[in-house]
Amino acid sequence: IDGLIHISDMSWTKRVQHPSEVVKKGDSVDVVILNIDAENKRISLGLKQAEEDPWLRIGETYPVNLVISGKVVRLADKGVVVDVGNDIEGFVPQNQINVPLQYTELDEVIWEGMTLDMTVNEVDPIHRRIVLSVHNIPGDQPPKPEPKPEGAEPEVEVAVAEEADDE
């Protein structure tokens, strides 16, 4: 018997765009039967339902005032999205980032892949969000990657091996 796992039932924390992000053909997975449609001979299955929803205990894992580290996932219009671990993303509003005075733009001091130390300001399990603040931008970060011009070919290092004699 085959069943279908809808992408919305694959992860509690990730926005799954394609099933291959979570499973691959031939994987054996634990699932929960969500619905049996005998008339259409369909079974709806849930992958995420086989595990506890991490947002149910998020306040215990990330209590208010806890200092945590996280990696910047992306810069948004009004702040920064950060991976705080366990596939949980937090949000740092722009007004909660202490940007040094010599900089005018957020992307001059924070970029994708950067690690930040943050304080948990708010935990909202119902709306599935964590609000964070950054008070000091660490100075020991890897340099900001230079943007590539549109249509530029990626730089690749190539090592040439010497040919062996066929004697």
Image (cartoon, grey):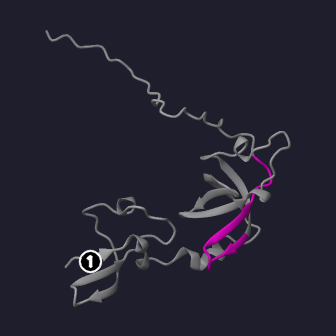
Q: How many marks?
A: 1
Q: Is residue 78 left or right of residue 160?
A: right
The residue positioned 76% from the left and 47% from the top of the image is 137
Q: Quadrant of the C terminus?
A: top left
Residue name at image x 69 percent, y 51 percent: 116
The residue singled out by tag 1 in the image is: 3
Front-lying residue, 70 or 92 = 92
| Residue type pointed to by label 1 | Gly
The residue under the point 43% across, 79% down is 49
x and y, in percent, of residue 26 in the image = 24, 63
Say above or below: 33 vs 138. Answer: below
The local crowd at label 1, few if under 14, some if 14 to 19, many if 20 or more residues have their Cα within 10 Å, is some
Q: Is residue 30 above or below residue 69?
A: below
User: In the current view of this chain or complex, which residue is farthest to the right?
Assistant: 101
Position of 20 relative to 57 (above/below)? above
Apparent side of residue 82 relative to residue 117 in the rendered image (left or right)? left
Residue 146: % across, % down: 61, 33
Q: Residue at x 63, y 57 (%)?
A: 82
Q: Pick whichever, 139 or 20, lies toward us.
A: 20
106 in the magenta segment:
no
Residue range in magenta is: 122-137
Q: Choose between 135 and 127: the one closer to the eye.
A: 127
Q: Secondary structure at mark 1?
A: loop
| Displayed quadrant of residue 89 | bottom right
To which quarter of the image does residue 29 belong? bottom left
